[in-house]
Structures are given as structure tokens and as C-alpha cells.
Amino acid sequence: MAKGASRIVLSRYHPLPGHREELLAAIAKLAGLATAGAGCYGARVFRSDQERDAVVAISRWGSEGAWESFARSPAVIEERGRFAHLLTRPAAEERFLPV
């Protein structure tokens, strides 16, 4: 974990058939917004080896507040709205905290 990161957020997305590449591009754009945001120590997009269709975004944050500010920002809400129609179900989110 990067020095100072106190939260890791894993978001899992499931695209509609035939829309995986389009969703990958949209999530990569969202990861770019996160990385540029205050309190983010980086965000990347991955493909899962457990769920072939899943697109996974992992981001590291300095605090829960930094993550919440990012997630509630108008730019992020707008971006998520742009790709919502590409999903088979709402994204699943999991947060990891240091012990």
C-alpha cells in the first residue's frame, strides 16, 4: 500500500454482452478522474481471472472522506451515468481497511 493510503476500494462491474471494451474504456476514464483527485494514491482497471466478464477498478485513498468526496462529485456522478446502460447489474463495491 502506498504511504498514507488508508482505504482501498475495489469496484466490480459486469458489462452487457458485447459491451466489455466500451465499459473498459469508460471505467479507465473514471480511474483517471480518481487518480487526478485529491487524496487518491492511484487507480487502475483490471480484468478478473475469476469472472471472465468482470471489469474491476481498484483505487487507493488517503481517507474515507477523500473517497466519499470523489464518489459524490458531479463529474463522477455524470460519468457513471454515461456507462450505467452498459451494466447487467449495479456495480459491487468493497472497501479494504488496514489492520
Image (tube, rainbow, N blue to C red):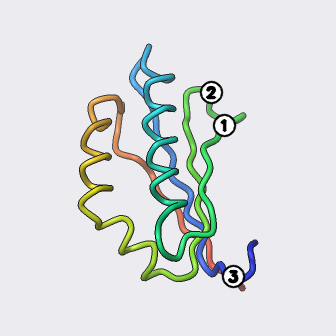
- The 10 Å Cα crowd at callout 2, few under 14, some 14 to 19, many 20 or more, is few
The single residue placed furthest to the front in the displayed view is 36
In the displayed structure, 97 sits above or below 58; it is below
Question: What residue sits 57% from the left and 73% below the top?
Answer: 61
Specify the amino acid type for callout 3.
Pro
Which residue corresponds to the image point at 64% horizontal and 41% vertical from the top-left? 46
Q: Secondary structure at mark 2?
A: loop
Instruction: Find out whether the residues at labels 2 and 1 contact each other: C-beta distance under 8 Å.
Output: yes
Mark 1 to mark 3: distance in Å? 23 Å
Precedes in sequence: disc 3 or disc 2:
2
Of the residues shown, which amino acid type is indicated by label 2?
A: Arg
Q: Which residue is at the front of the view, 68 or 25?
A: 25
Q: CA distance from mark 2 to mark 1?
A: 6 Å
Pinpoint residue 58: horizontal percent, then vertical percent.
60, 55
The image quarter in which residue 71 lies: bottom left
Q: Is residue 62 above or below residue 32?
A: below
Q: Which residue is mark 3?
A: 98
Instruction: Give yes or no for contact between labels 3 and 2 (Cβ–Cβ under 8 Å).
Output: no
Name the element at disc 1: loop
Which is nearer the eye, 51 or 56?
56
Mark 1–mark 3 CB contact (< 8 Å): no
Q: Which residue is mark 1?
A: 48
Please give the count of numbered marks on the rendered protein: 3
User: Image point 51% across, 32% down: which residue?
Assistant: 24
Which residue is denoted by mark 2 in the rendering?
Answer: 52
